[in-house]
Amino acid sequence: MDQTQKIIWTNDFKIGIDDVDLQHEYFVFLINRLIDELKISDDTAYKHRFLEELCLYAAFHFTSEENLMMKTGFPGLKAHKLLHRYLLSNLNDRINYYRLSRESEKEIIRFLIDWFTRHTLEEDRLFGQFMCETSNPKR
Amino acid sequence: MTQTAQSIFIISDNRKSGLLAEILSGQGYCLFHASPKDDISTLVNHAGPDLVLIDIERSIRSGIKICRSLKREKISKAIPVIITAMLPDLQDKEDAFKAGCSDFITKPFSFAEVIVRIKNSLLIRKNMESLEQVVDIQTKQLKAEKERFSKLFLSSPDATCLIRLPDRCMIDLNPSFEIMFGYSKEKCVGRGFDELNLFADSQIKEVMFDLQGSQKPVRDFEGRAIRACGEIFDVSVSSDAATIDEESCLIAIIRDISARKASEKERKVLEDQLQQAHKLESIGTLAGGIAHDFNNILSVIIGYTQLAMLHIKNDRETCGKLEQALAASSRAKDLVSQILMFCRKETRELKPLNVQIIAKEVLKFLRSSFPSTIKIKQDIAPDCDMILADPTQIHQVIMNICTNAFHAMKQSGGTLDVSLKQVELSDPPAAGLVYLKPGQYIRIQVSDTGSGIPKDTLHRIFEPYYTTRPKGEGTGLGLAVVHGIVTGLKGGITVESDPGKKTMFQLFFPVVPPLEKKSPEEILTVLPRGNERILFVDDDPILVEVNQMQLEAFGYTVTGVSDSLTALEFFRKDPDGFDLVITDMTMPDMTGDVLAGKILEIRPEIPIILATGYSEKINPERAEAKGIRGYLNKPFLQRHLAFKIRELLDQN
């Protein structure tokens, strides 16, 4: 199995909240771009900065998602926040490891793909269901 | 010097962040790890780290809480805390800094960033510590120095004050200042130095504040100062400029030297007195020597004048002229005897006497001879002890002083005040009486309200021939004689004069010690006695009789002869009939020393006592050279004779 295989965005990834789905789609786009950039470029500084861009987008997305959860009174917010922090911390560590050449590009990509598929498809979907149940009548 | 590795205490729930730890230990830090669930406070206090790093993913709040509790405890208070967090709220950051954390690192971060931040916090902490240490040491040193100087300032016996130069305002002063000048600190501080009238000599202030001009500190400038009560005293002022609290100031140190000045003055007076005494003594010695020669010359003049008068008995006119010469000679003789009295060369018999009786006699006489313009006041204590003196000398002393007083008041009139009292002289004696031993004295105080004696001549009045009176009115010997007599009696004399107002003489005579006050009978009983045979020779038959009686009373067998030739005959007839010979020196036909020589030719070992008045021809040394073993100055006291007789007889 090719470990650097890109994610192909499908409607199955959608959790039913437009804002979140949009960000998720863009995150997939970023991961796919990372796969390309890492392959194409041999500019280490650029690679580091691109990882940073991805990391910052993740942080932006998490904050955005948490704010929405806060606004809608999602009961799983606390647990979800922890998860976000764990993920981000992990990514942060990995980037630092990568910069010290102690982590490979493949490992980072595998972590990102794994993160996206599991987190988005499993954890975020709970929020989508909650939104669906509570906000549909309001919307 | 090996430095101990700095230690970092990491509190983390992120089991995977081993890399940060690894990198930190690679930087040489010593690391401690703990989980948020541990007893952080105890662990931190036990480890005593240089920095605490809180990296709790699970909850930023719990990290802030830990930080707050660490900052609350005394031991961990100073340890810097760094908190790392992901996706922190602005509120979280605010709270973290409020809790006392020194740095807040937001993820995503780079490891290098964390290391630098840790380094910075550690550096700040280290610098703070060393700064605190330096401040601590300097504070201690400053405190010690301040204490030392304030002690010096506060306990200095010299009045010390600090004056601000531009406006001369008193800034500070020490307790000695308050005591010396009598102004309280509260009253002086804040006031202008010139408002306090501290110095009697304006020059002191000029010198004190002239520092800018001379650029030199003032040292021991002497002058007079004024206390709050108005008393003026001597001070020595030192001052120097100093910059205190960025203000130009003057430090003034004022020393009270009044005690030193007083003792200096006293010493000067004593020195003057001593010098005066030496001067009088040497004048006395000189005058005495001249007087004796002069006396001899006078004897020749008188003798030959008398002889000449015998030759020209019938030439009444020439006789009359010679009589004038004779009268002048006898006046000269009187003068000589006065000089001798001053020189204390004349031996007089001293006996215990009551001065008050003599004083009363003199005053009685003066009352009748003074004009009515001069009043006499007297205050004579009746029950004084006796003094050892010659009554005629005492008479002369009081007379001389009172006569002087009369002369001072002759023109204007006034009051003569004479008091006599027994006083105790303490040790050390009052000024002017340096030579007197402490003890009981009779004090005669004579004061007049006459013209007084000017200060510049006061010290000369006891000199012989010093007089202010017109020629012919005084000999200039009066006070010199008084001085000679008084000091000869181991007494003292002082004079004080306020020109134009009054003059006061004080005479002091030592009272007779109790032992000497025994009655003559008592003295006789304790005098040595004997039963030997004595040949007594004197040309004065009365003296022969008196002494014979006296010696017989002592138990001796006495042969008295009033003629030296007869005496020699007596001795030649029975040389072994006598154990001792007493002979007068001055005798017609054969003098005492010649008689003694002839007797010694007959019996060389016989003891002989030669009695003599003041004589140039013979003295103890010369007598001894001739083999005369005993020598007595006339007039002699009976007890002197009694002791001398035994002394010689007991030698045999």
Image (tube, rainbow, N blue to C red):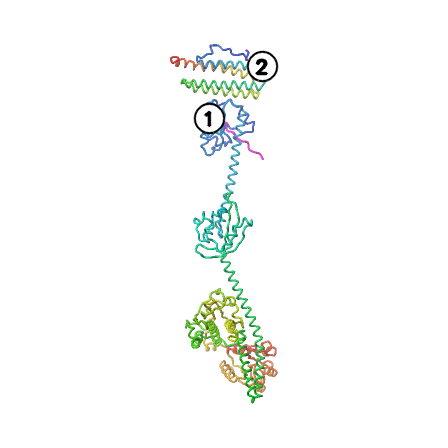
Q: What label does residue A29 carry, if any?
A: none
First to last magenta residue range: B1-12
* Amino acid on which disc 2 is placed: Ile
Q: Quadrant of residue A38?
A: top right
Near-viewer residue (B373 or B564): B373
* Amino acid on which disc 1 is placed: Lys
Q: Relative to B98, does residue B400 appear above or below in the rendering?
A: below
Q: Relative to B626, does residue B30 appear above or below in the rendering?
A: above
Near-viewer residue (B573 or B431): B431
> The disc numbered 2 marks a residue on which chain?
A
Q: Secondary structure at mark 1?
A: helix
The residue labelled by disc 2 is A40
> The disc numbered 1 marks a residue on which chain?
B
Q: Magenta span has B140?
A: no
Near-viewer residue (A19 or B317): B317
The alpha-carbon separation of the residues under discs 2 and 1 comes to: 40 Å
Answer yes or no: are tags 2 and 1 on the same subunit: no
Return the residue found at the far bottom: B314
Residue B523 seen in the current view = yes
**Where is residue B331 drawn, in percent x and y?**
53, 79
Q: Secondary structure at mark 2?
A: helix
**Where is residue B556 drawn, in percent x and y?**
51, 82
Q: What label does residue B93 carry, if any?
A: 1
